[in-house]
Image: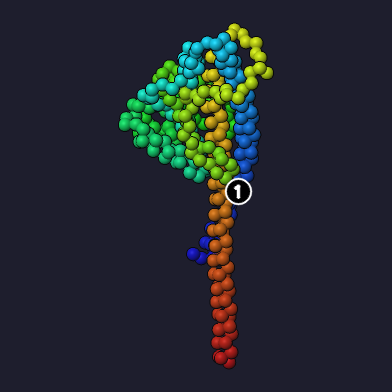
């Protein structure tokens, strides 16, 4: 490669490096913003969980006070929100798989699809045994290429999704579980451990785990409920389930921005290494060229001197 070609390649890579560095800075800003959104959601989810714990504890407290011989698990079976808390015999499973329509995020999408593929091979003999809620074109394409049923698909999810933007797919996933279209709903997505690390999680979202009521002091939390406690829980429990799913989507978006930030930083570092290598090669060839030119001048001068 000539000196001119090396110089041209260096200029091209420098421009690419400037672009990837700018994208890394943008992703860093987006990551910090989505982390704040996630923190706000966590506060909301925690408060909602505490309300449900107190309400359910109040139900149990009333039963104890009245010395009713009612099994607590059976109590759940007597009211409508039982659908979200009772484990049914698992015949069919629903999966919500969260990928990204945007690229430049390293192995973000490929890791999720690889894990999903491993799971369905381990659990299912036929695609008829499960259904997928697909978020992002990569998982949609995978499902269509492999004859997998898609219950609902969602594309072009923004960097900071609101609940309204994901409400349809979230509510449909909860509704189909309640209607016993499937008996278990699992979420597969990239979880953000921190700005540098992500991991693919397979999380059972439905049925919900029963609320932790062992250490709740109901004496300090009295509620006036209309029309009654059961009716309130019938609204809160589905809301609780939907909020968990939305929280996982926010978590996935956080991991996506973290992955993109790292990918762009790595691309910038790689570009800088290539530039350093090319610059070293450029200087060597330039030095050789200058040396050869000096030698030619000296040889020419010597030849002229010899001819006199």
Q: Position of residue 289 (x, y in %)?
A: 55, 73
Q: Position of residue 222 (x, y in %)?
A: 66, 14
The answer to which quarter of the image holds residue 197 is top right
**Left or right placement of residue 154 versus residue 23 in this view:** left
Mark 1: which secondary structure? Answer: helix
Residue that lies at the very extreme toward the front in this rendered image: 67
Q: Is residue 7 above or below residue 124?
A: below
- Placement of 302 over or under 253, stated as above or below: below
| Residue at the left extreme, as displayed | 125
Query: 87 or 71: nearer the eye?
Result: 71
In the image, 306 versus 260, the foreground residue is 260
- What residue does disc 1 label? 21
Residue displayed at 46% across by 20% down: 86
Residue 12 % position (x, y): 55, 54
Q: Residue at x 56, y 66 (%)?
A: 280
Neighbour class for label 1 at 10 Å: few (<14), some, many (≥20)?
some
Q: Depth check: 133 or 299 in front?
A: 133
Q: Residue farthest to the top?
A: 227
Residue 189 can be seen, yes or no: yes
Q: Nearer the viewer, residue 97 or 78?
A: 78
């Amino acid at each position: 490669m000539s000196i001119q070609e090396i110089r041209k390649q260096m200029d091209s890579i420098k421009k690419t490096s400037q672009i990837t560095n700018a994208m890394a800075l943008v992703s860093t800003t987006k990551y910090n913003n989505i982390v704040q959104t996630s923190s706000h959601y966590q506060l909301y989810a925690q408060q909602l969980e505490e309300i449900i714990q107190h309400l359910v504890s109040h139900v149990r407290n009333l039963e104890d006070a009245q010395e009713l011989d009612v099994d607590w698990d059976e109590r759940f079976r007597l009211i409508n929100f039982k659908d979200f808390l009772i484990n049914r015999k698992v015949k069919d499973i629903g999966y919500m798989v969260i990928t990204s329509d945007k690229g430049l995020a390293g192995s973000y999408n490929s890791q999720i699809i690889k894990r999903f593929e491993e799971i369905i091979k381990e659990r299912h003999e036929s695609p008829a045994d499960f259904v997928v809620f697909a978020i992002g074109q990569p998982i949609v394409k995978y499902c269509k290429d492999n004859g997998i049923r898609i219950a609902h698909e969602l594309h072009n999810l923004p960097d900071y999704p609101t609940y309204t933007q994901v409400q349809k797919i979230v509510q449909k996933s909860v509704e189909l579980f309640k209607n016993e279209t499937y008996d278990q709903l699992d979420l597969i997505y990239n979880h953000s451990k921190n700005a540098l690390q992500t991991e693919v999680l397979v999380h059972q979202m439905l049925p919900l785990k029963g609320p932790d009521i062992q250490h709740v002091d109901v004496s300090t939390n009295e509620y006036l409920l209309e029309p009654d406690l059961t009716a309130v829980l019938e609204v809160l429990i589905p809301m609780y389930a939907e909020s968990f799913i939305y929280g996982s989507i926010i978590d996935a978006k956080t991991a996506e921005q973290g992955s993109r930030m790292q990918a762009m930083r790595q691309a910038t570092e790689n570009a800088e290494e290539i530039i350093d290598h090319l610059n070293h090669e450029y200087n060597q060839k330039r030095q050789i060229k200058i040396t050869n030119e000096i030698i030619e001048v000296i040889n020419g001068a010597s030849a002229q001197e010899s001819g006199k």
